Image (cartoon, rainbow, N blue to C red):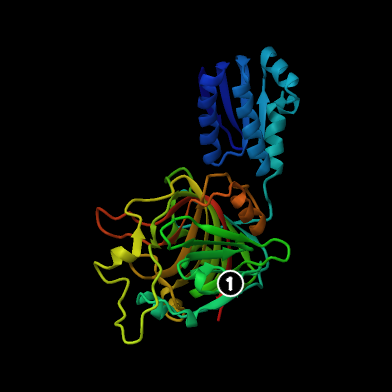
């Protein structure tokens, strides 16, 4: 089979020639996947020169039709050969057939949002647009728990706080799901929460993240050892795309764009984005309760740090989609906010971010709702992992910082 691909302003067209059987269906699927990952959500499959299609081929058509429909994209078969047209009609898939690409392009164009404004982003070729949500909204920040004993390697339950995470509370830190009793002792780990979705990866050796979602009267609750929370609403939505010039966008560039979008020197940010790579660390074991008089350590002291934290020696969770929660601030403002560390080597931009990675799925374009975007990520019931995002600035051997392809950022200025 021959597969050729052409991309226009509003429509991506893939032309097939040959048999779409079990052997070639996988090749067609890869071509479609590449198209979707590049940000093309209106796809026409030209099957004028396809003389045979099996059930394996039909499955691919149905799969991508559903996937693009779920993000308000469009998938259609154009110029279908007589054999293909007959098979699709018998299979009850006549709705996939289309005869005029002009109409398809017009349909795609009408889905574009016109209420946004373009903004400058600090990387050549990258694009960004901002949608107003509630320009008067802000996030009131606070810090439950107490980090000192935990960062010294000793658990202190008396400093923990039980925190509920309804729709208007976002946050991150070290915590555990549960009722707060002694049975939760080994379940502490990095957590993040936003829009009624909470994820925590216990440092119990399982490397298996757990999650809770806001459902009916059930509100996710986390026993927080220490953390940073933002309560309130989001002022703006930033949509970004890496563009064609570079393979990805670094986290620091996206964080700075969010600060600019809300016109503030400090912001709370929730991001759902297609991931190029993630760089960070996870806690490997939960601190134990030490007896009075025992000498506390420091989990960041070398070489003991290797027993406490697991770092991504290489970039992780490539080609996934992630839910990222965090806070960013200028150097001057960060001195007034706890738990923020430099995001760039110069120290001019600081932040604290946690990310949960999921199997890849495309994001709908335009103005989207945070909860409606975040909660479907859990439909696969498979959270790949949770990372505290950190930058690796070692020369030559460093993994750099987390990078993204395109995504949506809900952001608001911080008040204390």
* SS at circle 1: loop
Horizontal relation, residue 336 to residue 409: left or right: left
Q: Who is closer to the viewer here, 248 or 399?
A: 399
The spot of residue 119 in percent (x, y) is 55, 58
Horizontal relation, residue 314 to residue 182: left or right: left
Q: Who is closer to the viewer here, 380 or 9?
A: 380
Residue at mark 1: 179
Q: Who is closer to the viewer here, 313 or 47?
A: 313
Q: How many marks?
A: 1
Q: Is residue 386 above or below residue 76?
A: below
Residue at the image point whose x is 63% and y is 39% from the top = 67
Q: Who is closer to the viewer here, 111 or 172?
A: 172
Q: Is residue 17 above or below residue 102?
A: above
Quadrant for residue 74, please give it.
top right
The spot of residue 357 in percent (x, y) is 50, 52
* Whether residue 173 is visible: no
The spot of residue 327 in percent (x, y) is 50, 69
The spot of residue 151 in percent (x, y) is 37, 75
Quadrant for residue 350, please give it.
bottom left
Residue at the image point whose x is 70% and y is 17% from the top = 87
Q: Is residue 20 above or below residue 123?
A: above
* Whether residue 62 is visible: yes
Rendered-image quadrant of the C terminus: bottom right
Residue at the image point whose x is 54% and y is 29% from the top = 29
Check disc 1: other Cα within 10 Å, few if <14, some if 14-19, many if 20+: few
Residue at the image point whose x is 40% and y is 80% from the top = 148
């Amino acid at each position: 089979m021959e597969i050729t691909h052409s991309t226009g302003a509003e429509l991506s067209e893939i032309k097939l020639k040959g048999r779409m059987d079990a052997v070639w269906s996988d090749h067609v699927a890869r071509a479609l996947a590449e198209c979707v990952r590049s940000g093309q959500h209106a796809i026409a499959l030209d099957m004028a020169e396809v003389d045979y299609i099996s059930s394996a081929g039909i499955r691919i058509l149905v799969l991508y039709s559903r996937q693009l429909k779920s993000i308000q994209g469009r998938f259609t078969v154009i110029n279908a050969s007589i054999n293909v047209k007959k098979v699709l009609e018998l299979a009850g898939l006549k709705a996939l057939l289309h005869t005029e690409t002009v109409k398809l392009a017009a349909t795609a164009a009408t889905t574009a949002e016109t209420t946004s404004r373009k903004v400058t982003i600090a990387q050549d070729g990258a694009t960004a647009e901002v949608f107003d949500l509630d320009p008067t909204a802000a996030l009131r920040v606070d810090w439950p728990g107490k980090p000192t004993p935990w960062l010294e390697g000793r658990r202190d339950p008396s400093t923990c706080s039980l925190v509920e995470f309804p729709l208007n509370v976002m946050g991150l830190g070290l915590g555990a799901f549960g009722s707060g009793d002694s049975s939760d002792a080994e379940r502490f780990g990095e957590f993040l929460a936003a829009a009624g979705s909470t994820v925590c990866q216990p440092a119990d050796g399982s490397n298996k993240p757990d999650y809770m979602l806001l459902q009916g009267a059930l509100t996710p609750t986390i026993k927080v050892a220490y953390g940073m929370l933002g309560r309130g609403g989001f002022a703006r939505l930033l949509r970004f795309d890496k563009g064609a010039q570079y393979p990805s966008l670094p986290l620091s560039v996206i964080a700075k764009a969010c600060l600019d979008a809300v016109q503030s020197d400090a912001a709370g940010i929730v991001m759902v984005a297609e991931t190029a790579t993630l760089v960070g660390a996870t806690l490997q074991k939960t601190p134990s309760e030490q007896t009075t008089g025992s000498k506390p350590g420091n989990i960041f002291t070398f070489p003991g740090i290797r027993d406490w934290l697991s770092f991504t020696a290489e970039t992780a969770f490539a080609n996934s989609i992630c839910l990222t929660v965090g806070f960013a601030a200028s150097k001057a403002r960060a001195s007034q906010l706890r738990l923020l560390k430099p995001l760039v080597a110069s120290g001019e931009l600081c932040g604290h971010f946690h990310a949960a990675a999921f199997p890849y799925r495309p994001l709908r374009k335009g103005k989207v709702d945070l909860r409606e975007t975040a909660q479907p990520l859990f439909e696969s019931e498979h959270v790949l992992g949770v990372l505290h995002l950190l930058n690796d600035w070692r020369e030559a051997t460093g993994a750099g910082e987390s990078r993204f392809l395109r995504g949506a950022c809900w952001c608001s200025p911080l008040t204390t």
